[in-house]
Each structure stands twice: as structure tokens, then as C-alpha cells.
Image (cartoon, rainbow, N blue to C red):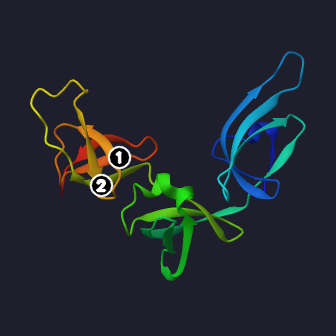
Amino acid sequence: MAVLSYNEILPKTIIDYNGAPYEVLSAHIFRMQKRKPVNQTKLRNLVTGQVLEISFHSSETINEAETERMDATYLFSNPKESWFAEAGNPKNRFSFPADAVRDQVQWLAPNTVVEVLTYEEKPMTIKIPVKVDLEVKEAPPAVKGNTVSGGTKLATLATGAKVNVPLFINPGDIVRINTDSGEYTERVTKS
């Protein structure tokens, strides 16, 4: 377990804070007048999802969390939870509360392989690809001259997620979506 000084606590680092794993969402090091430097951070608890704002002073250190990664297959979601199975071991199934992974699961089709972050051998959170290719299930037809709204329309994807796409996208097309922003990036040609 690595010990991090205040200036090594950077975004996407996972630290052990008060006995729980926290992901660093943002970090900003600054100095106020003649005082010592401070690292102002925003941390997200990987168990509860709670976000805290914590300041680390130059004399403080913190332990990096001992986390591991495993591949898992997304199975299905119901209103309360989303289910996954360890890749290569379908008997090892586990779930996350729907609120904890809703933003990521909306971009996953069944049997998609994702990366699961574990802490003390317990699944904590999932990491999905930055870009995913999904089929368009519903898209209203383009109306000639309808470019006042910027030339986009709301389409429903195979996973049920809704996204703004250009007017030339039709049902059955495959589109690439940026999962961080939830925006259309391009149409993918079928091979």
C-alpha cells in the first residue's frame, strides 16, 4: 500500500480515507498568502456514492487504497439493482444498487464485458468503455427544412437510453456514443 503525500492526491486516484475507499474526483493545490500549500479535493465514496470536499495540508499523508480489477459481464437491470457475473466464472454473480450505476448501465447491452473495481474482495463500482456502439431502435423521420433546432432529433437506443442524433440517422443504424458526456459522436458502418 503506497503512502501519498498531499500533492500526489490527484484525480482518478483511489485513496483509503477514514477506512473507506474514495475516488478523487478533482484536486487543486493552492497557497493562500503566507500559509503553507493546501490540496483542495473532491472525493466520492465508492461504497455509498457520497461526495465530500476535503483539504489536505502539506504535512499530511494518506494511504492509497488497495484495489483490484476484474472483468465482469453485464447481465440485466431491474428497478432496484443491476446484475453482473465474473467473466469466466458465471456462478459468481453480484449486483449494485440501481442508483449507484444507473449512469453507466444505460449504455450497456446485455453480455457486455465491463471492468469492476474491487476493494477487500468486494465489488465497489464499474468502469465502462469511453465509447460504445449501440443500435438505434426508434428515431422520428427527418422533416425537410427542420434545421432550426440545429439539425438533431431525439433517438432511442437498443438499451433504452435517449440521445440527440443528426437528422440522417434512422432506426437500425449503429451509432457511437461517448459515455462520459452521453453525446453522439459518429455513425458506425456495419461490417
Give the position of the C terminus as an image quadrant: bottom left
Mark linked to residue 134: 2
Instruction: List x then y, in percent, for residue 24.
Output: 68, 44
Of residues 187 and 162, the one nearer the viewer is 162
Disc 1 to disc 2: CB gap under 8 Å: yes
Q: Tell me where residue 118 sits by quadrant.
A: bottom right
- Residue beneath the point at 40% across and 43% down: 182
Instruction: List x then y, in percent, for residue 130.
Output: 44, 48
- Give left or right: position of 142 versus 53: left
- Tell which residue pokes out farthest to the left in this image: 144
Instruction: List x then y, in percent, for residue 59.
Output: 90, 37
Q: In terms of sequence position, does the residue under pointer 1 or pointer 2 come before the other? A: 2
Give the position of the N terminus as an image quadrant: bottom right
Q: Mark 1 points at which residue?
A: 177
- Residue beneath the point at 73% across and 61% down: 66
Q: What residue type is labelled 1?
A: Ile
Instruction: List x then y, in percent, for residue 47.
Output: 67, 59
